[in-house]
Amino acid sequence: MNVIKSFVLAGILVASALSLNVCAADRAPNIVVILTDDQGWGDLGVHGNTNLQTPAADSLARDGALFERFYVQPVCSPTRAEFLTGRYHPRGGVFSTSTGGERLDLDERTIAQVFQEAGYATGAFGKWHNGTQYPYHPNGRGFAEFYGFCSGHWGDYFDPPLELNGQPVRGQGFISDDLTDHALAYVETQREHPFFCYLALNTPHSPMQVPDQFFDRFKDGEIPLRHNGLQVEREDVAMTRAALAMCESNDWNVARVLAKLAELKLVDDTIVLFFCDNGPNSWRWNGGFKGRKGSTDEGGVRSPLLVRWPGHIVPGTRVKTPAAAIDLLPTLAGLAGVRPNLAKTLDGVDLSPVLLGQGKTLPSRLIFSHWSGSVSARDERYMLDGAGHLFDLISDPGQAHDLRESQPDVARRMTAAVSAWKKTVLAELKKEPRPFTVGYREFPLTVLPARDGVPHGGIQRSARAPNCSFFTNWTSTADHITWDITVATAGRYRATAYYTCPAVDVGATVELRLGTTATTAKVSEAHDPPLVGAEHDRVPREGESLVKDFKPLALGDITLLAGRGELILQALAVPGKSVMDVRGITLELLPD
């Protein structure tokens, strides 16, 4: 651990020492956005947590700006959608974290498209969580380079299956390190012209896995700061230890990014921004705020926001103005001098004047948080929670004293605003079924994972959470799996299923059908690898499925017509006790 700490500190010191004001007047600044997953406001040393050490992130606050009140949404995909668009997530059709509800509507323009049109190279590395199939895929939303995974969470963080621009690859080592490796290589490759690099680390989201060099410091140690909210007795200290170790692992990778910018003499050329996607994923110290991930209370939606741009943002800047994920697109565009060509009105505002010292105040506004029907609202002082209780966040950030009776005018004003937001913004959220998209010439391989399919009959998911699951318990010809799809391009497609099957069950015949066209194949080869992932868990997992190595089964070529239909995978004969377990299928559009 001493070696790692030394590297972290050395990277930060080098980054400061090599800040040489080399940014040419005619060069737009590079942008590096670092987003971590399920890391709460309280999981940083700069916010007062002495349980862990986060010198790299803390250095961004020291050398740049810290937002004292920055808000995201209670869960992953809505926050990511708001960062991407500058608009509240209901406007973009994001209402869930899996089974298609995480997809960002295709008529929404993203921050990557804005910067790409301004001449930037654009790359995303890590967790996407706003759509898997092209054109929902990152490569269809303005990111020319993508390495990572599109799901909401993953089942094993060591040597995991990932993708590179739509093609399956195998990750190397611990996932956060691997994602950062690719981001660093991208920065080095693009160093000669402006780049937008989005590094979306997927930790400390569960499963709680982290290399020994980080976990060893916490596994037997005391945790002096404990959850001090209303649910103090609910903290799982084993979970806290794992989460803190994962946060220190994140910080090590932040330090690597800063060191790479210093090595390439890009420090003053580059805006670095760090934030998190929601509150902490367990009850642990979080500044006394009420709530955690999934809650619209303060603990569920208050996030760090740290921004560094040497020579432009005064070191040690503290921004008291409340801000939100919806502000990031207009603010980064404002800092970079980019004028977004947007057809839709943004909900966010440009905070670059505040960061650059050109203006310290903005017109008063309300910031709204929403999840699963609960809406809370905040202004510079007050908060109305999802149940209609009013709190003064300046004197009572823990939401202990309801002020509805003593401040009736404020309560009425904010209640009316929430009602209006529900009738306008939230009313835009349509949960109508949207088919999964298949068949684009510019992106011929389409993945249809189990999480996007629907099991019928006795078929079950391998775990409660769909995101990293596979289908199992397929025992009958009456059982089947369906995907609601729309085919963009008529033509011949090569169909492949990813399966496992023990030797005793080999021999089933399966059919893939869409409308009147079908192809059949026989499960003729056993493939029965063990489930893995649990051996890396620091605490028992609850929602994520264990994983295994699925093998491709060629289903044959099938001719598909353009349009919407139900893709059906069904067994025609089951000689054994089961057909196979299925991780998903792929459809590859073949050349004319």
Image (tube, rainbow, N blue to C red):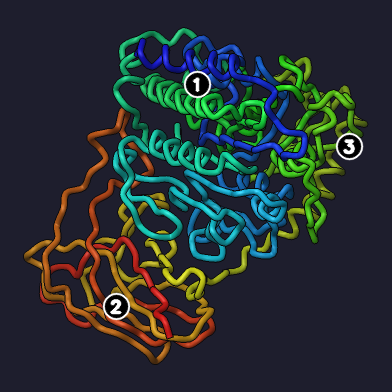
Q: Where is residue 156 in the image (x, y as percent from the top left)?
A: 32, 42
Helix, strand or loop under label 3: helix
- Residue at 63 percent across and 20 percent down: it is 19
* Quadrant where the C terminus is found in the figure: bottom left
Q: Position of residue 590 (x, y in %)?
A: 39, 80
Count of numbered marks: 3
- Distance CA(mark 1)–CA(mark 2): 46 Å
- Residue at 17 percent across and 68 percent down: it is 578
Task: Please report whichever mark, 1 or 2, sits nearer to the chain's N-terminal start.
Answer: 1
- Asked whether residue 157 appears in the rendered view, the answer is yes
**For the residue carrying disc 3, how many other residues have a C-alpha within 10 Å: few (<14), some (14-19), or many (20+)?**
some
Q: Where is residue 109 in the image (x, y as percent from the top left)?
A: 70, 57
Residue type marked 3: Arg
Vertical order, 203 against 255 (above or below): below
Q: Name which quarter of the figure residue 57 lies in.
A: top right
- Residue at 48 percent across and 40 percent down: it is 183
Task: Please report whichever mark, 2 or 3, sits nearer to the chain's N-terminal start.
Answer: 3
The residue at which mark 1 appears reads as: 284
Task: Please report whichever mark, 1 or 3, sits nearer to the chain's N-terminal start.
Answer: 1
- Asked whether residue 372 appears in the rendered view, the answer is no
Residue type marked 2: Gln
- Distance CA(mark 2)–CA(mark 3): 56 Å
Helix, strand or loop under label 1: loop
**For the residue carrying disc 2, how many other residues have a C-alpha within 10 Å: few (<14), some (14-19), or many (20+)?**
many
Front residue of this view, candidates 363 and 10: 10
Vertical order, 405 against 195 (above or below): above
Residue type marked 1: Arg
Tell me if 247 is positioned left or right of 496 in this view.
right
The residue at which mark 2 appears reads as: 570
